[in-house]
Amino acid sequence: MPLRENLIDARFVGREVTIYVMGKDEPIKGLIDEVARYEIGVRSEGSPVVIFRHAILYAVAEATELHGYSNEQLRDTVIDSDMVGSDVEVYLVNGLSFQGKLMKVTKYELGFRIEDKGYIVPKSSIAYIKFTM
């Protein structure tokens, strides 16, 4: 089975998300309209918005959008599918932090369950992760 690069892929088209990006205090909320390798198209407040993946701090969707556990194997990474289900504290590069459960691992993104929401975080937005016991 090939390794998925991103959690937000074509399966998210038509789904509602809230995306937090660098340099903007308010999130972009809307329906995903199109998904490409480096951009995500969102219809927000009636207007199309193109969000570049490298600017995403994190995205929030329904927890069920993470589609359960990941069984993919990663090479050359410390975080792999064996850690799925672990309780974690996640510290982002912008100083924000949150606690949750690691639910999904892909090449460029991690998925976390926090209360009843699914958080999708690019690895490039994470400063470090502390695994809690």
Image (spheres, rainbow, N blue to C red):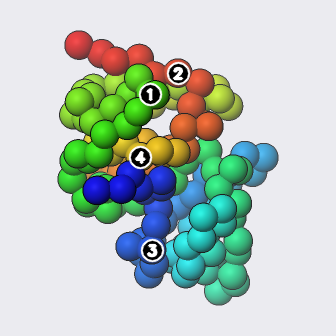
Circle 1 packing at 10 Å, graded few (<14), some (14-19), many (20+), is few
At 37% from the left edge and 37% from the top edge, which residue is drawn? 74
Q: Nearer the viewer, mark 1 or mark 4?
A: 1
Q: CA distance from mark 3 to mark 4?
A: 15 Å
Residue bearing mark 4 = 106
**Relative side of 125 to 107, left or right:** right
**Above/below status of 115 relative to 5:** above
Q: Judge by depth and name the residue closer to the eye, 47 or 13.
A: 13
The location of residue 111, given as percent across then percent down, is: 38, 45
The location of residue 112, given as percent across then percent down, is: 36, 41
Mark 1 or 4 closer to N-term?
1
Label 1–label 3 contact, CB within 8 A: no
Mark 3 or 4 closer to N-term?
3
Per the rendering, the mark at residue 10 is: 3
At 57% from the left edge and 58% from the top edge, which residue is drawn? 19
Mark 2 or 1 closer to N-term?
1
Q: Secondary structure at mark 1?
A: loop
Circle 2 packing at 10 Å, graded few (<14), some (14-19), many (20+), is few
**Above/below status of 49 relative to 64:** below
Residue bearing mark 2 = 128
Mark 3 residue type: Ala
Mark 4 or 2 closer to N-term?
4
Q: CA distance from mark 1 to mark 3?
A: 25 Å
At 52% from the left edge and 21% from the top edge, which residue is drawn? 128
Residue bearing mark 1 = 77
Q: CA distance from mark 4 to mark 2?
A: 16 Å
Mark 1 residue type: Thr
Q: Secondary structure at mark 3?
A: helix
Label 3–label 4 contact, CB within 8 A: no
**Relative side of 115 to 19, left or right:** left
**Above/below status of 124 relative to 52:** above
Mark 2 residue type: Tyr
